[in-house]
Image (cartoon, coloured by chain):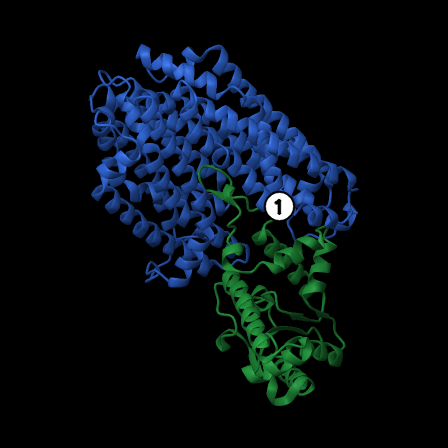
Chain colours: A green, B blue
Amino acid sequence: MAHTIITIGRQFGSGGGRIAVAVGKKLGIPVYDNELISRAAEQSGFSKELFTRSDERRSLFTLSGFFAPWRMGQGGGSGENFIGDDAMFKIQSDVIRDIAAKGSAVLIGRCSDYILRDVPGVLSVFISAPMEYRIRQISEREGLSAEQAAALIHRKDKTRSTYYNYYTLGSWGEAAGYDLCIDSSILGVEGTADAIIAFARAAQEARP
Amino acid sequence: MPDSRKGFSASGGAPTALGTQSIPSLLRQFAVPAIIAMTASSLYNMVDSAFLGHIPGSGGLAIAGLTICFPLMNISAALGTLVGVGASTMISVLLGQKNYASANKVLANEITLNTVVGVLFTLVTLLLMDPILRLFGASDAVLPYARDYMVIIALGNVITHLYFGLNSVIRTEGNPTLAMKLTIFTVSSNALLDYVFIFPLGMGIRGAALATILCQAMALCYSLKHFSNQERLLHFPKGRVFQLEWRIARDSLAVGMGPFLMNLASCVVVVLINNQLRIYGSDQAIAAYGIVNRVMFLFVMMVMGFNQGMQPIAGYNYGARLYSRVKSVYMRTARWATIITTAGFLIAVLIPETVVSIFTSNPELKASAAHGLTIIALVFPIVGFQMVTTNLFQCLGMVRKSIFLSLSRQLLFLLPCLYFLPAVLPNPLEGVWYSFPISDLVAAVVTGLFAIGLLRKLSALKDGESPATLGSSIQ
């Protein structure tokens, strides 16, 4: 396969991260998760701390620049050059575009489907799973009770959707926004990865 | 490793220059437009006050009326920024992703939301005008002046909101020169109309209010026309886009909430100041404070202009781990800020009468304002350092410290002083005046302690080193 770019959005606990890694391994192409994207950005001269920091604060209230009182419009600059969350998002977007321009890749999260929406041939995938399945996965992986796992899932999904919806003005996880949406509980990690690859191949052949 | 950054074109040309160009030239480039904008908005207020102070026959009452209206107008401005900042931020993010359709939708929604919020403010203010003005410190003598002024300002409120809102969007879409021209236009035409309405036409304080609204209306018309051009990337789209979308409204209000609360807090302080001045002094003391405030504001705004210019430079270089450049821009900005506030101090101490005579010809008011000015400016030379250091914490993302330091000067230390000093001093009015330098001094000392810690750690870091130690031990 020539240039293959697959973006993967996922519900927390759906196994989306592992599926992405499996897709990358089977295709022999690099997989970029949050950490790798940050590292790539770091090579641009920005410190990783800024990224991890900006990643952890994802309620609308903190996103909001609640703590940026000097953005007040009255007669001054709006501070877009300032390394706030919005500037971070811009740097991240640039890094993601850079990665996509360089060659085949699987990109996890970070609104990469939206950032690359105008790049032809990018396949955007969203992976979901029923709540019971995700609770089982998370309680096993993190050693939590079912209630704790459910609460964690709820919180993480909320964080992801707030982040996504704020920056894209779209709807996180809404089927119409993606090329392919899969329930990972049906085929499991390996099976879902195979299905995504099959779809990607078919899509590439269908393209003129 | 500054060189690893060079191959990386993605963050665009300007940010790279932030890491390489000389600090003085960068500061000039970023600070000068901000200072001009800040000074312009400060001049706007000064001109209004200067004309009002010379209304024939009103003595200090007109200017006292205006001073009573400040916090109310600030609340209105705060509501405008509540919508405007949020919408500009969202538009800026969407434009950055070339998502023009969504950016246009946010722009259209901003108009609707601003109108709704603006009309609500107008209704509440008009219905509760007298009780509000009394709460804000208006006496029977001042009330008519304050009311005359505020009724017109309240009626034109939607215009004011839309004018400021669109001006900030114009800046966001990368057109700072146009935004500046519009600001300069409103400042100069306001001065002209103030003169015409107040003197030849004899409209008094109403004339000043009318001039303000008319000038903003003219600038607003231009902005509306600017965004109606369908060929611009950012414009009012056709269709039912003005219909408010819940999530756009929610997001932009959430984004603007921080600045709004800060503005609101400063209004509360001004209301307390006015009331203390009325209780322990007189209407004249309020008028005197109004004049002093206008004078000091000019210098404070100039420092804020420097702060704005420093933000992208310090922020970028911190992100790029070029700590020596962070320190260099901080030192340079602090030096300039100190020069500015020292100039303010010298003027206030050496020629207070001359300065206040810009605003009034009434000899008693002149004496009282000059007296207040000298006291308030007592420790002003260190205020520049305090403001710039607060800004440094903000630039480095240490937001809690930055907020604490910024509140310390204007709220945390000022409120108790205002409250208790008049009660314990033999001359209560002096207590109100002295509250300002005392809280400035305490805030500067606290800020100095914070700054020593930060600078020591910053100096220990070599360029290129991870700022982890800095972040963890400081925050």
Q: Is residue B7 left or right of residue B124?
A: right
Name the quadrant containing residue A36. bottom right
Residue B29 vertical position relative to residue A48 in the rendered view, above or below:
above
Q: Residues within 10 Å of mark 1 (few under 14, many from 20)?
A: some
Give the residue displayed 52% in from the left and 58% down from the top: B98
Q: What is the three-letter code of the residue carrying label 1?
A: Met
Determine the image quadrant of residue B184. top left
Q: Position of residue B393 (x, y in %)?
A: 62, 41
Side (left or right) of A202 relative to A61: right
Please name whichever residue, A206 or B59, is drawn nearer the observer in this view of the structure: B59
Placement of B311 over or under B143, stated as above or below: below
- B366 sits to left or right of B91: left
Is residue A78 toward the left or the right of residue A100 in the image?
Answer: left
Residue that mark 1 sits on: B398
Pinpoint residue B447: horizontal percent, then vertical percent: 61, 34
Q: Nearer the viewer, residue B213 or A156?
A: A156
Q: Picture coordinates of residue B121 (x, y %)?
A: 29, 46
| Total number of numbered discs in the rendering | 1
The answer to whether residue A15 shows anywhere in this view is: no
Residue displayed at 29% across by 36% down: B135
